[in-house]
Image (spheres, rainbow, N blue to C red):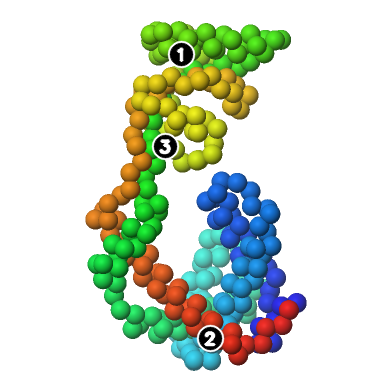
């Protein structure tokens, strides 16, 4: 059992933080990160400890809010739970814990507002520097307008299906109209051959890896993906671009300000840890 200054930590909080941290890492890498579970769990535990230390400090520094403010916030909490399907019986059973959580949240809001009140406004040089250092955040992926021919292997000898697709590709490379070939030979339901504009969002997806290796107007190799043989042509290609600072200035400002606020909380949590009793 983990305790912070004598307060028992709900294991569910750590599990929720672990799930979120791992999911974020897997979205960025597009691969499962099971081998990093121990690292993610440690980060989750440290994050929860910091949150509890800050909540305890808020309780010390900020008096309980006025009754009318608590009542208004508590009623809003109940409405939110109801909107998410909670029954009145459940809300009645959890009434005291929800009210305590509401008071704690109001205290934390007042506490953080006080900590952030004197933060200086971010200047233009800092904003531009952050934009340059985080250019990947504002990268618009490359895109391609695609024609598509798909066939589903059905012969006893798979080579027959593959060689048939190779022959269609040779015809396209020899100058045959790819759109006409696709219309005549695709097995896609409805005969649709146009995929429209596709953005390269899944970096390691086999289909997109192949597609975005093509030059504009190029017909790709025959490849197998999701139980089918595919042949595509990149009719048009748009390269990746980074949104200029002027277009995302407001977003950058929000991110810089959020980073400053998080920095203040982390710095305070680190100081609180120096005198905290953390029992594992």
Who's the residue at 41% across and 8% down the image?
174
In this rendering, does residue 74 appear at all? yes
For disc 3, the neighbor class at 10 Å (few under 14, some 14 to 19, many from 20) is some
In terms of secondary structure, where does tag 1 sit?
A: helix
User: Which is nearer the N-term, disc 3 or disc 2?
Assistant: 3
- Residue under circle 3? 199
The residue that disc 1 covers is 182
Separation of disc 3 and disc 2 at Cα?
46 Å
Q: Earlier in the sequence, mark 1 or mark 2?
A: 1
Q: Nearer the viewer, mark 3 or mark 2?
A: 2
Q: Nearer the viewer, residue 189 or 129?
A: 129
Question: What residue appears at the point 45 percent right and 73 percent down from the top-left corner?
Answer: 262
Q: Position of residue 172 (x, y in %)?
A: 43, 11
Q: Residues within 10 Å of mark 2 (few under 14, many from 20)?
A: few
Quadrant where the image shows the C terminus: bottom right
> Which numbered disc covers residue 271?
2
């Amino acid at each position: 059992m983990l305790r912070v200054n004598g307060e028992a930590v709900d294991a569910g909080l750590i599990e929720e933080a672990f799930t979120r941290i791992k999911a974020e890492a897997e979205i960025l890498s597009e691969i499962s990160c099971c081998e990093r579970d121990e690292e993610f769990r440690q980060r989750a535990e440290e994050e929860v400890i910091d949150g509890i230390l800050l909540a305890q400090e808020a309780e010390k520094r900020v008096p309980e809010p006025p009754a009318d403010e608590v009542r208004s916030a508590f009623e809003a909490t109940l409405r939110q739970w109801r909107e998410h399907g909670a029954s009145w019986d459940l809300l009645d059973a959890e009434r005291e814990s929800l009210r305590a959580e509401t008071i704690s949240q109001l205290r934390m809001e007042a506490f953080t507002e006080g900590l952030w009140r004197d933060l200086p406004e971010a200047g233009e040089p800092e904003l531009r520097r952050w934009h340059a250092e985080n250019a990947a955040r504002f990268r618009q992926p490359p895109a391609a307008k695609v024609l598509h021919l798909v066939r589903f292997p059905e012969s006893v000898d798979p080579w027959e299906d593959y060689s048939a697709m190779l022959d269609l590709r040779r015809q396209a490379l020899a100058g045959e109209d790819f759109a006409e070939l696709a219309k005549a030979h695709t097995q896609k339901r409805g005969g649709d051959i146009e995929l429209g504009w596709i953005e390269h969002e899944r970096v390691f997806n086999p289909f997109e890896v192949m597609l975005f290796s093509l030059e504009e107007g190029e017909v790709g190799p025959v490849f197998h993906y999701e139980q089918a043989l595919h042949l595509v042509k990149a009719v048009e290609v748009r390269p990746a671009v980074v949104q200029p600072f002027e277009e995302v200035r407001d977003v950058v400002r929000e991110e810089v300000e959020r980073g400053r606020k998080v920095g203040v909380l982390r710095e305070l949590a680190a100081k609180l840890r120096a005198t905290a009793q953390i029992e594992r």
